[in-house]
Image (tube, grey):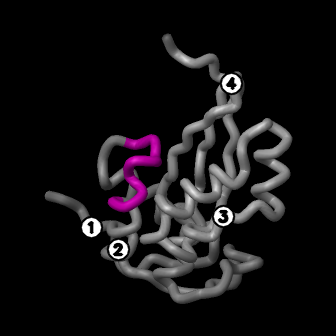
Amino acid sequence: MAKEIAGQLKLQIKGGAANPSPPVGPALGSKGINIMDFCKQFNARTQDKAGKVLPVVITYYADKSFDFVVKQPPVAIQLLEAAKQKSGSAEPNRKKVAEITWDQVKAIAEDKMVDLNCFTIESAMRMVAGTARSMGITVKGAFPENN
């Protein structure tokens, strides 16, 4: 028999660095989830991605048990890593902070493809390029066509 789902919780936590302090502790504690159990499982699962911000979707059940899915790092964070920047532009339409290549955009799109709501790598690349544009990061060259 399937467990009764009590709800879902979405958090962004650095890989391998979940601890019971805020924001993780209060978010889980208010739902009745065992905080230390979650932290141990999350840290064990994400030790290979230590330091990267990872979105996690926690499904908790009526009997206080839980399971969670760790997703790929957000596109914005991957773009900042690729551009070697600390943050995006405050005025992206006027002030550009960095440039990246279409190859870097393709690598990010392939990495994030499972979490995006698109079916082709070209559409994923356009989504990543749009995020870059809104952060003040320009993409060098023309969109690579597969003709």
Q: Which secondary structure class fits the magenta region best?
A: helix
Whether residue 52 is situated above or below residue 3 in the rendered picture: below
The image's mark for residue 144 is 1
Answer with mark 4 or mark 2, whichever residue precedes in sequence.
4
Residue position for label 3: 18
Residue position for label 4: 63
Residue range (magenta): 110-118
Answer with mark 3 or mark 2, whichever residue precedes in sequence.
3
Give the residue type at disc 2: Trp
Q: Are marks 2 and 1 in contact (CB under 8 Å)?
A: yes
> Does residue 3 belong to the magenta stretch?
no
Give the residue type at disc 1: Pro
Q: Are marks 3 and 2 in contact (CB under 8 Å)?
A: no
Residue under the point 47% across and 65% down:
129
Whether residue 56 is situated above or below residue 65 in the rendered picture: below
Answer with mark 1 or mark 3, whichever residue precedes in sequence.
3
> Can I make out residue 91 in this image?
yes
> Can I make out residue 133 in this image?
no
Q: Nearer the viewer, mark 4 or mark 3?
A: 4
Residue position for label 2: 102
Whether residue 16 is situated above or below residue 60 in the rendered picture: below
Q: CA distance from mark 2 to mark 1?
A: 7 Å
